[in-house]
Image (spheres, grey):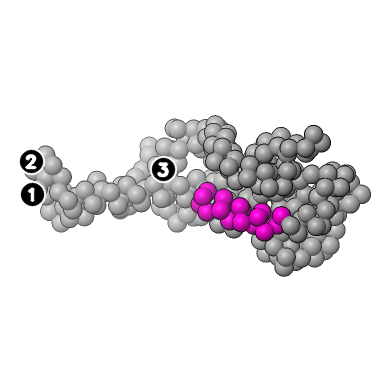
Amino acid sequence: MTSYDTQDPAFDAVPPADAARGGEPSADSRGGEPSRTARGGAGRAGAQSVDRTLHLLDTIGAADGPCTLSELAAATGLAAPTAHRLIASLVRYGYVRQEPSRRYTLGPRLVVLGERATRLLGGWAQPWLTELRDLTGETTNLAMLDGDEMVYLTQAAGRHQMRMFTEPGRRVLPHATAVGKALLARLPEASVRALLARTGMPAYTPATLTDPDRLLAQLHLVRRRGYAVDDEEQEAGVRCFAVALPTAPNQMAISVSGPLGRISDAAITRFTPQLRRLAAELGTALG
């Protein structure tokens, strides 16, 4: 049998102004219309329950594996009956899944929403990527740090016959990409080392950095000059430079990629101010 935490204000059926009268409706609501105080109390309680539900969902998403109810209640500071009631709603709608072990993990409904959100995000970002493509003539990309990997969300194809193409949805490790290094440079050193310990640093080309200390030294340079470069580290003959979106709600970066012969040091110097400007504008628009 499900128990309920009747002391939880988010689920108190009686607005605070009426509680002192033992739950009797306020004078203004006896005619069928709730009082302004009652409406305000119900609105605050509803907003609080939404906040708590989203906090639970974020906690499940950030966990290393499936969680028990008691673990989620402790992590969120909720009473166990309250956490159970909120999770039951998430399970019912498919946002959370209860495993046979009775532990909770993210549900399949989020995959559908994530795919839709990614398509929408790609559409929103296109004007900025297209402007950057028109300025440089090269392929431009938007990517996001998702867990320990970079995922490419969308791109604007370059105007040259020989151009780079990265399929949206492709996942790569961050240590060998300009977008990845632009975002790793925003993390504390301990977090970067922990990520590298989990993923390793496989070599994709002879130029790939495979030593954490060398990568950390390069991230220091990224912070100092404000952009990151992939010098044939992901793919031979390809060079890329990237800037993080400073105010985006997620860890995102935009980049310009092309053949080594066209993405010269002079080209990077010439186009980086525009890359920074567009990154700032896009971050503000998405935020």
Question: Which is more toward the observer, 101 or 56?
Answer: 56
Question: Which is more toward the observer, 237 or 106?
Answer: 237
Q: Residues within 10 Å of mark 2 (few under 14, many from 20)?
A: few
Q: Tell me if 15 is positioned left or right of 89 in this view.
A: left
Q: Amino acid at mark 1?
A: Ala
Q: Is residue 192 visible?
A: no
For the magenta stretch, what is the residue range?
A: 271-287
Question: Could you give the CA–CA distance between mark 1 and mark 3, rounded to whole angstroms?
Answer: 32 Å
Question: Does the magenta-highlighted stretch encompass residue 274?
Answer: yes
Residue 88 percent across, percent down from the top left: 43, 38
Look at 66% across and 47% down and name the residue there.
132
What residue sits right under mark 1 in the picture? Answer: 27
Give the structural element (helix, strand or loop) at label 3.
helix
Q: Residues within 10 Å of mark 1 (few under 14, many from 20)?
A: few
Q: Amino acid at mark 3?
A: Leu
Q: Is residue 168 above or below residue 226?
A: above
Question: Which is more toward the observer, 193 or 99?
Answer: 193
Question: Does the magenta-highlighted stretch encompass residue 275?
Answer: yes
Mark linked to residue 31: 2
If you read the primary sequence from the N terminus, does the residue marked by circle 1 or circle 3 appear first?
A: 1
Mark linked to residue 86: 3
Q: Residues within 10 Å of mark 3 (few under 14, many from 20)?
A: some
Mark linked to residue 154: none
Q: Please, what is the dominant secondary structure of the magenta stretch?
A: helix
- Outermost residue to the right: 206
Where is the N terminus found, in terms of image quarters?
Answer: top left
Tag nearer the camera, 1 or 3: 1
Q: Tell me if 62 is positioned left or right of 2 in this view.
A: right
